[in-house]
Image (cartoon, rainbow, N blue to C red):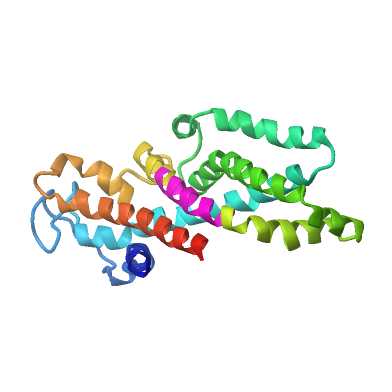
Amino acid sequence: MKGRLGFGVVLLVVPLLIAIFGPFFVPDEVTRGRAFVETGILGTDFVGRDVLHQVLLGGRTVVLVALIATGLSYAVGVPLALVAAMARRRWLDELLMRPLDIVLAVPSLLVLILVAGVAPRGYTTVVLVVAVVTVPDIARVARAAALEVSSRPALEAMRLQGESRWRLAFGYVVPTVAPTLVADLGVRITAALYLVASASFLGVGVAPDAADWAVMVDRNQAGLFLVPSAVVVPAALIIAWSVGVNLVFDRAVRR
């Protein structure tokens, strides 16, 4: 089990370190040569830029945007779930959850395609879209876990003692459902990473020639057999980070 955790930490930390500190090792002036030429360590990409430099530059947009979008999703979804689960009035639960079910019924890729046609390009758009399509899933999972806890005799005893709603929610319910939320968090980060990468493929988040791991995988496919590292390296980093997140969070839940 310790070996599995160590393997997960390596898979998680290596892409994260590259994403955070990689840009500091790239020269300010980016030179361009011939496209898909095996020069340097990893060769050149579809516009003649050094693939190693693009790998060092391209992680922040994928990793950090996914983390920010996931954090925003939980900041919205968990409080909604707590209010719905602890509400004494059935109509309030229905009022909060039914609109989320409508959003959940729309495929996330369809939302991205629609946004690509009407919304301005930028990281803010990607974060908001990913948060909107992720909030319903988080709210449903958190609500299902909180419903069971909110019906326990211990919580009713706390109510009779005059404890505030804040104390009930964040002093008892949230710590009790924390393992479920932690387990779900690993899945949501991976899903957010997938959506951020998909947004890059669709041109929602970044420019078509931006230094971005997802864009590199998409744009360099034409030279896969000439300079395979231009596709394989960024794809491997995305996969490693996704697997590492789930392995680490799975271990956290077990502990």
- Range of the magenta residues? 181-194
Task: Give the residue at x 91% y 56%.
Answer: 160
Percent across and percent down for residue 61 are 40, 55
Relative depth, front residue between 12 and 228: 12
Relative depth, front residue between 236 and 2: 2
Q: Is residue 93 magenta?
A: no
Of all residues, the one furthest to the front in this rendering is 153
| Residue 211 can be seen in this image | no
Q: State which quadrant residue 84 falls in.
A: top right
Task: Give the residue at x 45% y 42%.
Answer: 121
Percent across and percent down for residue 139 are 63, 43
Q: Main secondary structure of the magenta part?
A: helix
Q: Is residue 247 above or below residue 24?
A: above
Left or right, 107 with reference to 237: right
Percent across and percent down for residue 156 are 84, 53
Quarter occupied by the N terminus: bottom left
Percent across and percent down for residue 97 are 69, 35
Task: Give the residue at x 18% y 46%.
Answer: 46
Q: Is residue 165 above or below residue 202?
A: below
Left or right, 177 with reference to 191: right
Task: Give the residue at x 16% y 53%.
Answer: 229
| Residue 82 can be seen in this image | yes
Q: How many marks?
A: 0
Left or right, 56 with reference to 46: right
